Amino acid sequence: MPYFVVEEDRSTRYTGIVDAAPKWGLPGIRNCPACKATWSAGFSYPCVDLTPVASLADFEKARPEPIEEYERLCELVRPLLPSGALLEPGTTFGPSVGKAQGRFGPFVMPISWVLMAQREALEKLQAEDLRGLDGCRLQVRFRQRNSPELLELEILPMGRLHRDCLPPDYQPPCSRCGRSFIPLPDDLLLDVATLSRELDLFRLEDFSQVIICTERFVDACTRLGLDGVAFRPLPSK
C-alpha cells in the first residue's frame, strides 16, 4: 500500500492563522539519570479530557521535571488515553486555546506536526469510512464574522522509520528516558513491518512530528476537493 507524508500546501491562497496551544501537557524530563539530557517532544491528544485528574494544575505549565515526577504524572493520565496511544515528555492533551483569524481552507497546518480541519471536511472524510479519524473543536476566538468551526485531528502513533534510512552510526534511544539521539533523516523510508494497525492517518512513533496517510486518504481528499495540505510520496520497505 502506498503511503504519503502530509505537509502544509504553501501554494494555496488561504490566509488563516491559528495562535493557540493545548490546555494541558506532561512536563519534559530534566537531567535524565542515564543520558543526562533535558528534553521534551511528545505526542498530541486533543480529544483527551484531563478534568477527572485531581492534580490538574500539574499539567497546566510547561516545564522540565525529574524523571520520577514525569513518570508519576504519566500514570495519572494513562487510563484516559485512547487505545494505542503513547506518552513522551511534552505530550499534550485537550483542545487548543487561543485566537485565530483569516480565511481557512478545509485543512489547516499551523505547524508541521499539527493537522486541523473544518468540521464539514472532517465529516465528509468520516463518511468515507477512513480509519483513525477523530477531532476536537478548538477553543479559539476569531477576529471576524462567519468564523469556521475548526477541529484539531487526534492522530495516533503507529510505525517507525526503517533502519536503512538512519545514519550508519545510529544509536538506540536512551534505555531510561527514551530520548532519540538522531535528527529526522532527509530521505525517509517507512518500515512496513512496524505498522501494527489499520489506520489511514497516523504519526510516526519514533518521529512524532511526521504525519502520514494512506493512498485511500489521498484519494478521498482529491475526490472531495479538500485542500490546504500536500501529499509527498513516502517510500516503504
Image: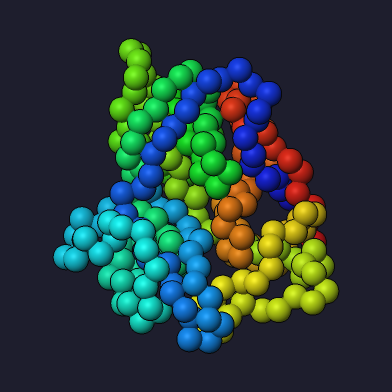
Of residues 74 and 184, the one drawn nearer to the viewer in this rendering: 184
Q: How many marks?
A: 0
Compared to residue 11, the image places residue 44 above or below, namely below
Image quadrant holding the C terminus, namely: bottom right
- In this rendering, position of residue 118 left or right of residue 228: left
Compared to residue 42, the image places residue 21 above or below, namely above
- In this rendering, position of residue 96 left or right of residue 9: left
| Residue at x 62%, y 52% (from the top left corner) | 210
Residue at the far top in the pictured view: 145
| Residue at x 54%, y 36% (from the top left corner) | 109
Compared to residue 119, the image places residue 52 above or below, namely below
Measured from the top left, where is residue 34 in percent x and y? Answer: 53, 86
| Residue at x 75%, y 59% (from the top left corner) | 185
Residue at the far left in the pictured view: 54
Compared to residue 218, the image places residue 166 above or below, namely below
Of residues 44 and 168, the one drawn nearer to the viewer in this rendering: 168
Residue 54 figure quarter: bottom left
Instruction: Report the coloring of the rendering.
Output: rainbow
Of residues 105 and 56, the one drawn nearer to the viewer in this rendering: 56
| Residue at x 61%, y 60% (from the top left corner) | 207
Q: Decide if residue 87 is in sight here.
A: no
Residue 189 figure quarter: bottom right
Measured from the top left, where is residue 208 in percent x and y? Answer: 57, 57
Measured from the top left, where is residue 125 in percent x and y? Answer: 52, 33
- In this rendering, position of residue 38 left or right of residue 11: left
Measured from the top left, where is residue 74 in percent x and y? Answer: 35, 71
Q: Decide if residue 203 is in sight here.
A: yes
